[in-house]
Amino acid sequence: MTFSVLGTDGRGGVGIAVTSSSPAVAARCVHLRPGVGGAASQNVTDPRLGVALLDALESGQDPAAALAAVTRDRDLVEHRQLAVLAPDGTGAAFSGSGSLGVHHHVVGSGVVAAGNLLADRSVVDAVVVGFEAASGDLEERLLGALAAGLAAGGEAGPIHSAGLAVVRDVAWRVTDLRVDWSEDPLGELRSLLDMWLPQRDDYVTRALDPTAAPSYGVAGDE
């Protein structure tokens, strides 16, 4: 029901973009920790596995070791699809034998993509190529990768939710956008990103140094 992409910007930033036929996919599948990395837990989703993957990374394990530790001897793991990426661009992925429908995962350089209930395995390949071929902000590259996957066929059925989140060098998600139900979730996510990106860094400034924060002209903040 889902395809996702994790990517790095080569400067410590890590992000995830995901879309699904299910509602509120980003609420369950997106796991990020600044300075540690990112993980996607999908298919018959168990969000605890995303947290466990980040804990393993933070303990010093590389993505392959983290994935092996989390999946080893775990009940029901064959129903899960997992992907994990470290800030240095190394990644790993797992698709259990119970992954739904046509499923696939690809680990590239600085990118990992995975999907299930796909129109075709080539969807995940297109996601990776789309990310690797793109330039600009990490958010733009991640959303472009999802769009490439959709153009390659996407899921077997229509998508209805999407999300995009990025962590960098502060203790919170510098970008965290969600479309929980829509007939055009990637189109709405694009509109949100177009609004958000010009203000993203100003909101980091607001947190770190309110005296330097710009005003956005809202009532009471002129």
Image (spheres, rainbow, N blue to C red):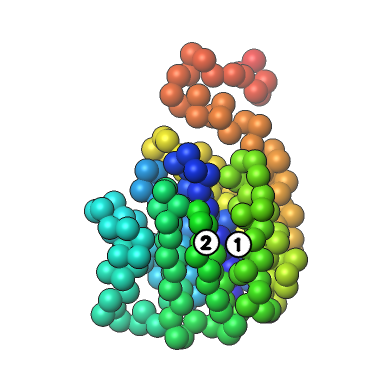
Residue 207 to residue 46: above or below: above
> Marks 1/2: CA distance?
7 Å
Residue at the spot 41% in from the left edge and 35% down from the top edge = 170
Q: Are marks 1 and 2 in contact (CB under 8 Å)?
A: yes
Asked which secondary structure carries label 1, the reply is helix
List the single residue furthest toward the front: 109
Task: Assign the N terminus to one quadrant of the image.
Answer: bottom right
Q: Could you say which disc has been placed on residue 209 in the image?
A: none
Residue positioned 66% across, 58% down in the render: 130
Tell me the SS state at disc 2: loop
Q: Is residue 143 visible?
A: no
Q: Can you give x and y, in whole percent of width and height, for residue 70 in the image?
A: 30, 69
Disc 1 target residue: 128
For the C terminus, the image quarter is top right
Circle 1: residue type: Val
Report the label total.
2
Q: Please state the horizontal and vertical placement of residue 27, each as a whole percent of the image.
A: 50, 59
Residue 108: numbered disc: 2
Mark 1 closeness class: few <14, some 14–19, many ≥20 residues within 10 Å? many
Q: Nearer the viewer, residue 157 or 126?
A: 126
Reply above or below: 22 against 120.
above
Q: Is tag 1's residue or tag 2's residue first in the polypeptide sequence?
A: 2
- Which three-letter amino acid code belongs to the residue tagged 2? Gly
The location of residue 112, given as percent across then percent down, is: 51, 62
Residue at image coords 61%, 69%:
124
Q: Using residue 76 as the reference point, say whether residue 108 is left or right of it.
A: right
- Residue 106 seen in this snapshot: yes
Q: Give the residue drawn at x 46%, y 85%.
A: 98
Res 147 → quadrant:
bottom right
